[in-house]
């Protein structure tokens, strides 16, 4: 008997129960492997047999090229689309000179910054902020040459400048000092390590896993499962196939994953560039006593929060009875995905959350 297993987050099934193994779902999946593309006519006899998914065994004359199918999928009817002209290599279809000027300005700013850092011309010089410098330069360009320069040129200048300056700063090897909040965070970690606590990072939040098949020769199968880091209920689904009885579906089994002290982070589904958004952090406490904790948010490149990349944010001190939440306001500099890391420290426990 062959048995297939799957573990899925029950919260996902409450939003959409299409992933629950049922008889009609199995039959639909079997019908999806039907080689037929619908009964009906064709331009010739060979095409009729091929569309029906039938194999022809005959000694009559049949053109093999007309009945041979290279894929199991049916040919979909497609509309011919008009060809799109290639981009000229600049943003918004502007003149490439606008993008080159933006790149040159960004490189000049980075060159002056590295020169000052190397020769210590200006002590404690701050790192260039791409969006501020590039926007000021692009606005000046638009205001000064408003009648001569098209409106797309300042926009292309700004985009090229930000992309170039951000890329140059990400590859910079300049040493940066630690903030006092990073030192505070290091003291918290050191103090907890002295009490024997280790950092636990929760970073595996898959909604489903364990897509495995096993051959059961006896009456049972024993398998150890390591569940993911989500605080939720897991539904274990199984389907079996035998030679005598065919397909059978087992009743799903539920397993609860729970911690007495944990944090939950609510993230938006999507964030656009330059958009302000809130991150709500809830600290849950199921211990018999109240807990005092400090919540940190680690700064990363591409997000404006008030802390430099790699440094810790100012700690938020909270007293947790049953649950308490705190929120952080961020601004995205890019539209790509980012990793968020939240930490919650108390004198008795330390938790990490990475998304």
Image (cartoon, helix red, strand yellow):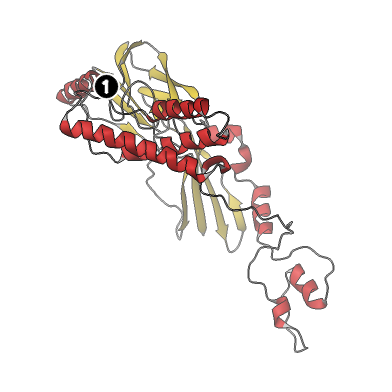
Which residue is painted at 66% across and 63% down in the image? Answer: 73
Residue 274 x/y as whole percent: 48, 27
* Picture layout, residue 271 above or below residue 36: above
Q: Relative to the observer, which residue lies in front, 80 or 209? A: 80
Q: Quadrant of residue 66?
A: bottom right
Splitting the image into 4 quarters, where does residue 199 fall?
top left
**Number of callouts:** 1
Q: Is residue 355 above or below residue 27?
A: above
Between 307 and 163, which is closer to the camera in this rendering? 163
Quadrant assignment, res 43: bottom right
Residue 213 higher or lower than 184, as above or below: below
Residue at horizontal 27 percent and vertical 22 percent from the top: 349
Q: Which residue is mark 1?
A: 349
Q: Specify whether residue 209 is in view.
A: yes
Q: Residues within 10 Å of mark 1 (few under 14, many from 20)?
A: some
Residue 227 position within the rendered picture, expressed as x and y whole percent measured from the top left: 40, 39
- Horizontal side of 252 relative to 220 (left or right) equals right
Q: Residue furthest left?
A: 194
Question: Residue 264 in the image: x percent, y percent?
Answer: 42, 24
Please tell me whether mark 1 sits on a helix, a strand or a loop.
loop
Quick check: 49 left or right of 33?
right
Q: Position of residue 240 (x, y in %)?
A: 55, 54
Image quadrant where one finds the C terminus: top left
The residue closer to the viewer here, 205 or 331, is 331
| Relative side of 142 to 21, left or right | left
Instruction: Report the residue at 52% width, 28% height from top.
Output: 142
Between residue 345 and residue 270, name the one nearer to us. Answer: 270
Task: Answer whether residue 166 is visible to the viewer in this image.
Answer: no
């Amino acid at each position: 008997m062959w048995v297939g297993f799957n573990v899925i987050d029950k919260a996902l099934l409450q939003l959409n129960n299409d992933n629950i193994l049922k008889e009609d779902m199995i039959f639909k999946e079997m019908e999806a492997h039907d080689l037929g593309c619908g009964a009906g006519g064709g331009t010739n006899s060979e095409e009729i047999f091929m569309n029906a998914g039938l194999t022809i065994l005959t000694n009559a004359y049949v053109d093999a090229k007309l009945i041979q199918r290279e894929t199991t999928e049916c040919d979909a009817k497609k509309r011919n689309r008009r060809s799109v002209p290639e981009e000229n290599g600049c943003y918004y279809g502007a003149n490439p000179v606008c993008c080159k000027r933006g790149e040159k300005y960004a490189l000049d700013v980075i060159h002056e910054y590295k020169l000052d850092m190397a020769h210590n011309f200006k002590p404690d010089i701050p790192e260039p902020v791409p969006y501020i410098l590039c926007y000021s330069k692009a606005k000046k360009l638009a205001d000064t040459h408003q009648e001569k320069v098209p409106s797309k040129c300042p926009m292309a200048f700004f985009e090229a400048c930000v992309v170039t300056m951000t890329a140059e700063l990400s590859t910079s090897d300049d040493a940066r000092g630690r903030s006092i909040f990073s030192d505070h965070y290091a003291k918290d970690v050191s103090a907890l390590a002295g009490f024997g606590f280790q950092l636990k990072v929760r970073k595996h939040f898959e909604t489903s896993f364990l897509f495995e098949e096993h051959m059961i020769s006896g009456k049972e199968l024993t398998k150890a499962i390591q569940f993911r880091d989500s605080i939720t209920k897991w539904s274990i689904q199984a389907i079996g196939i035998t030679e005598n009885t065919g397909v059978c579906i087992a009743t799903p089994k539920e397993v609860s994953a729970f911690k007495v002290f944990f944090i939950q982070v609510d993230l938006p589904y999507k964030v656009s560039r330059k958009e302000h958004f809130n991150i709500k952090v809830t600290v849950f406490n199921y211990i018999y006593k109240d807990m005092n904790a400090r919540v940190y948010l680690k700064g990363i490149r591409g997000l404006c929060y008030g802390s430099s990349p790699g440094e810790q944010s100012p700690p938020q001190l909270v007293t947790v009875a049953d649950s308490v939440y705190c929120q952080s306001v961020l601004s995205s500099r890019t539209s790509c995905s980012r990793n968020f890391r939240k930490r919650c420290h108390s004198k008795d426990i330390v938790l990490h959350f990475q998304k």
